[in-house]
Amino acid sequence: MTTESYAMSSSGGTPLRRIRTPHPHDVLSGRGGGINAHPGNKVFREWVRLRKEDYNLAPNKAEKTRVALEVMDQVKQQNPPGRFLQKDTSVASGPVWWIEVDEARALAKTSQALREGAPQIRLQHKEELIERAEKAKRRGGKRKRKPVATGVTATTRKSPSVAVAETRSGESYNQSTNNVPASVPVVPQKPLRRLPTDEYNQAMENLQANVREAKSLAEKQQQEESSPQRPQVVAPLMSNSDFKQKYWSPINKRPRFDYPF
């Protein structure tokens, strides 16, 4: 009976080797009594058990990854080499086929197995973890700055505003004008003018007063717009008879007004 065959991957182009019967050194992914009873899975669980403390008590993620890779190497260094396999889901019916998973999935499976029971392991080694943390804290507190070598001046990081000021009036500006042709006159850069303390305080007070005044006008305008407007009272128009009776002069046959025409 054929134990291996080849099939095309879903991405196309790359053939995948399908395995009909895993050998005893392979590690199978999945659930069930048959997978747990596989000889390769039993050996894999024993190697994981022996390295759980190293993994869960590791000080950083890089150290944990190193422990997981060492367990994977133990599987692959057997004769014949062990493989991390999972069922081929592309086969809907018929016999079960297996395919080898990539390095990332094998590492994820190994790390997950190493993390099982991590709280109990940390609780058993609580005092050791506390002592390790205290040592790291003391070691970090004893760090000293490296001494500056003789004849070398220490450079300090300057703020952007100071750097811009020095560029405008200083050696940096003079260096930037070296590439200008001689026929073009160079305007000397004037130093930045700084306001005296009293003038600066007065300017800030005026600015704040203007802000308060503008804010007050805006609030007043908003109140006027939000308040209901009163209806405008308009006097009714006067009839012709009332107008003649009040303003018309029968003698001059023209309207009477307080001033002559």
Image (cartoon, rainbow, N blue to C red):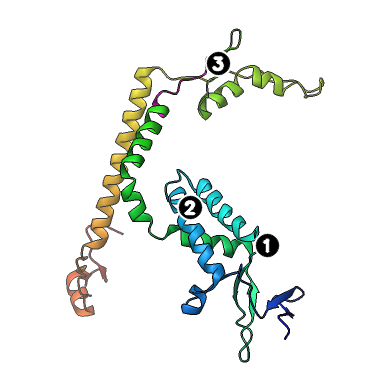
* Residue at the spot 56% in from the left edge and 25% down from the top edge: 163
Q: In the image, is 90 to the left or to the right of 147?
A: right
Amino acid at the residue labelled 2: Arg
First along the sequence among labels 3 and 1: 1
Residue 2 x, y percent position in the rendering:
73, 84
Q: Nearer the viewer, residue 118 or 33?
A: 33
| Mark 3 or 1, closer to the camera | 1
Label 2: element kind? helix
Q: Nearer the viewer, residue 141 or 250?
A: 141
* Residue at the spot 51% in from the left edge and 28% down from the top edge: 161
Q: Nearer the viewer, residue 134 or 23?
A: 23
| Residue 32 visible in the picture | no
Q: Residues within 10 Å of mark 2 (few under 14, many from 20)?
A: some
Q: In the rendered picture of this protein, how many numbered marks are placed on residues?
A: 3
Label 3: element kind? loop
| Image: 117 above or below 148 | below
Determine which residue is flagged by label 3. 154
First along the sequence among labels 3 and 2: 2
Image quadrant where residue 174 sits? top right
- The magenta stretch is 140-146
The residues bearing labels 3 and 2 have C-alpha atoms spaced at a distance of: 48 Å
Image quadrant where residue 232 sits? bottom left
Determine which residue is flagged by label 2. 51
**Secondary structure mostly taken by the magenta-highlighted segment of the chain:** loop
Amino acid at the residue labelled 3: Ala
* Residue at the spot 43% in from the left edge and 58% down from the top edge: 115
Amino acid at the residue labelled 1: Asn
Determine which residue is flagged by label 1. 79
Residue 31 x, y percent position in the rendering:
48, 76
